[in-house]
Image (spheres, rainbow, N blue to C red):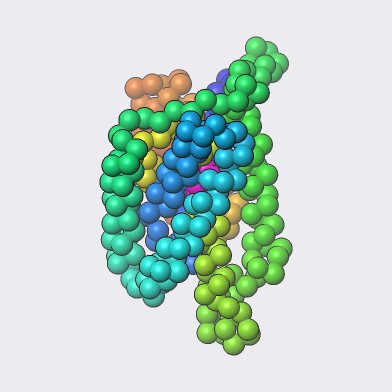
Amino acid sequence: MLTVLLDGIAYGMLLFILACGLSVTLGLMNFVNLAHGAFAMAGGYVTVVLVNGYGVPFLLCLPIAFLVAAAIGLLLERTLYRRLYGANHLDQVLFSIGLVFMAMAGVDYFMGARQQLITLPDFLRGQFHLAEGASIGVYRLFIIVICAVLAVVLQLILSRTRFGSRLRAAVDDGEVARGLGINVGTVFAMTFAVGSGLAGLGGALGIEVLGLDPSFPIRFMIYFLIVVVVGGTSSIAGPFLASLILGIGDVAGKYYIPGFGSFMIYTMMVVILVLRPHGLFATRGTS
């Protein structure tokens, strides 16, 4: 039981890092970016190329994956995404879906359709044994620690720093924010870049757990959306709690009731949204 719980927490933490960037762009910037998984895929493939092709240490690849995905996100935000901030959500969805299929086709052409694997360093392999015969993989424990630290840092940045207050001001009323001297374009660009970078970091961390192939953005798009919808988009705490609940439920369902396990996450989503239609932490009227 404890092993299943810890595996579920690790899975949930990974979902959070992958989805929190979408939560920020959708909730704070009001932009429906369904291409979010493509940035995660970019981080994953950067890690695969560096580890397998050039022998770069795995831990060094993690910040590189973040920076590469953030740079791609910043470039696309400055050249393409910014033109659609004022567009309706349907236009945003169609645009970002188009980017997803272009990214998938490009990766399939250059990297092939096969599943990608990496060799983890020795200190991240094996099992960490706990009380009562329970154990957790060292790598999953590593994911829990890294993602927990990132969740705390993100919450502090959004709630306690000048950048977080500027972002909220820019979202609430861009004209007033500009009148106060806030460079709204720069704030949005930096926010988008950080969200894309976090997706890239999640893609790098998730290679061993989730797998990596050109279908990754489509395969996990629904999971990202479920986390954001269930958690709400008004804070980081909502998607974080939603990721944990859904991760634990999904792993437990597949372990204890394999025949129904694949539907567990959808069942939990329906139940939670029936009880909390606006998300776990959203206030009434927030979508």
Q: Report x, y in % for residue 241.
A: 57, 45
Residue that extends furthest to the top in the rendered view of this protein: 133
Residue drawn where x is 41% and y is 21% of the image? 257
Q: Classify 202 as above or below 130.
A: below
Q: Nearer the viewer, residue 259 or 29?
A: 29
Q: Is residue 192 left or right of residue 38?
A: right
Residue drawn at x 62%, y 36% is: 59
Does residue 247 appear in this view?
no
Of residue 189 and residue 251, the one placed in the foreground of this image is 189
Left or right of 143? Residue 200 is left
Q: In the image shown, does 204 or 179 lie closer to the viewer? A: 204
Place residue 126 in its image quadrant.
Answer: top right
Residue 244, horizontal then vertical, whole percent: 55, 39
Q: Is the magenta stretch mostly helix, strand or loop?
A: helix
Count the numbered circles shown. 0
Q: Which residue is drawn at the image coordinates 38% and 73% (left, top)?
A: 83
Whether residue 150 is visible to the viewer of this picture, yes or no, is yes
Check residue 202 for magenta coloring.
Answer: yes
Pick the quarter of the image with the N terminus. top right
Which residue sits at x=51%, y=51%?
Answer: 68
Q: Where is residue 10 in the image (x, y as percent from the top left)?
A: 57, 33
* Residue furthest to the bottom: 179
Give the left or right position of residue 19, taking residue 129 as reference.
left
Vertical placement of 107 versus 7: above or below? below
Q: Nearer the viewer, residue 128 or 234?
A: 128
Quarter containing the C terminus: bottom left
In the rendered image, which quarter is residue 183 located in? bottom right
Residue 272 picture location, percent across and down: 46, 45
Report the span colored magenta. 199-203
The answer to whether residue 20 is magenta is: no
